[in-house]
Amino acid sequence: MKIVFFGTPEFAVYSLEKIYNSSHEVLAVVTAPDTEKGRGLKVSYSAVKQFAIERGINILQPENLKDEALINDLRLLNADIFVVVAFRILPEEVYSIPQYGSFNLHASVLPKYRGAAPIQWALINGETETGVTTFKIEKKVDTGNIYLQRLIKIDKVDDFGSLHDKLALIGREAVLETINLIESGNFNLLPQDNSLASPAPKITKEICQIDWEKPATDIHNLIRGLSPHPAAFFDYNGKVFKVFKSEIHSGKALKPGEVFYSQSEFIVGCQQSSLKITELQQEGKKKLKIEEFLRGFRN
């Protein structure tokens, strides 16, 4: 199969590498435009572009996915299928170009967690299971008919970072299997049950701020879902603290937002129980384990 791959972050590279090392041909990658970062405005480009440069794969970086020049370039490639992993929403003018259309890898068991942040919301909502879905791209976002799904358990110690990597690994297998199914013609598309749909909206700063009036379990799951980035945070004595790891603590009765700390513990009261913070970062300083943090902490 001749493939054009659409993707941007490291999550997408897992699948791109799997396809590249298979019997299929990657004609080109489509990825985000370069950006300028830092004080020196150093040019930065996506993980997918880095992979493509190292292997001499043709790279397209459109600002506008409806641009006629892009659409003409994609048509001239004469791909059999477009594969999309962690990319922008494709317009119909693009996803309908190939003979076999386009499919997307989504990091949830659709129709649950449709949207930009499925991994984060599965953790924030305390799910014990999640997975990946490959589906045929249609007009409405994340609603297309399903090629296949793969499920995994969410461990209690999982956070966004660890679950991201697990899903990227099973996702790359699902992507290659889907390409092989389409090539063989031996598949049945399964429609999504829209009545079971749930949202996974983009993570905003407001979502990241901890509300100590909520139960400790909810706050602990929020921390898991946002660690290591962008990270849940709270204000204490005029300073911002990002929290990366925590534990439910029931041994000390504290009011919501009330802080207790010693040489080895930093505990904050919640609506139900308390939360023991085990890894955090004060603004302007390094991320630290709690024991190391407390050695230099001044209230």
Image (cartoon, grey):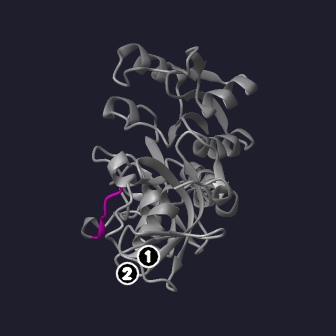
SS class, disc 1: helix
Residue located at (45% from left, 53% from top): 233
What residue is at 44 percent from the left and 76 percent from the top?
217
Residue pointed to by mark 1:
217
For the magenta stretch, what is the residue range? 196-200
The answer to whether residue 228 of the structure is visible from this angle is no
176 vs 108, left or right, is right
Residue 30 seen in render: yes
Measure the C-alpha gap from mark 2 to mark 1: 8 Å
Q: Which residue is mark 2?
A: 272
- Nearer mark to the viewer, of 2 and 1: 2
Q: From the viewer's perspective, is 168 left or right of 220?
A: right
Residue 115 in percent (x, y) is at 36, 51
Three-letter amino acid code at the position of disc 2 = Gln
From this viewpoint, which residue is outermost toward the front? 298
Answer yes or no: do the residues labelled 2 and 1 have beta carbons within 8 Å? Answer: yes
Is 130 rendered above or below residue 73? Answer: below
Choose top left, top right, bottom left or bottom right for residue 169.
bottom right
The residue nearer to you, when weighing 142 against 288, is: 288
Q: Nearer the viewer, residue 85 or 45?
A: 45
Residue 150: name its quadrant: bottom right
Q: Which mark is residue 7?
A: none
Q: In the rendering, at what x and y percent does residue 126 appear? A: 44, 73
Q: Amino acid at mark 1?
A: Thr
Choose between 219 and 282: the one closer to the eye: 282
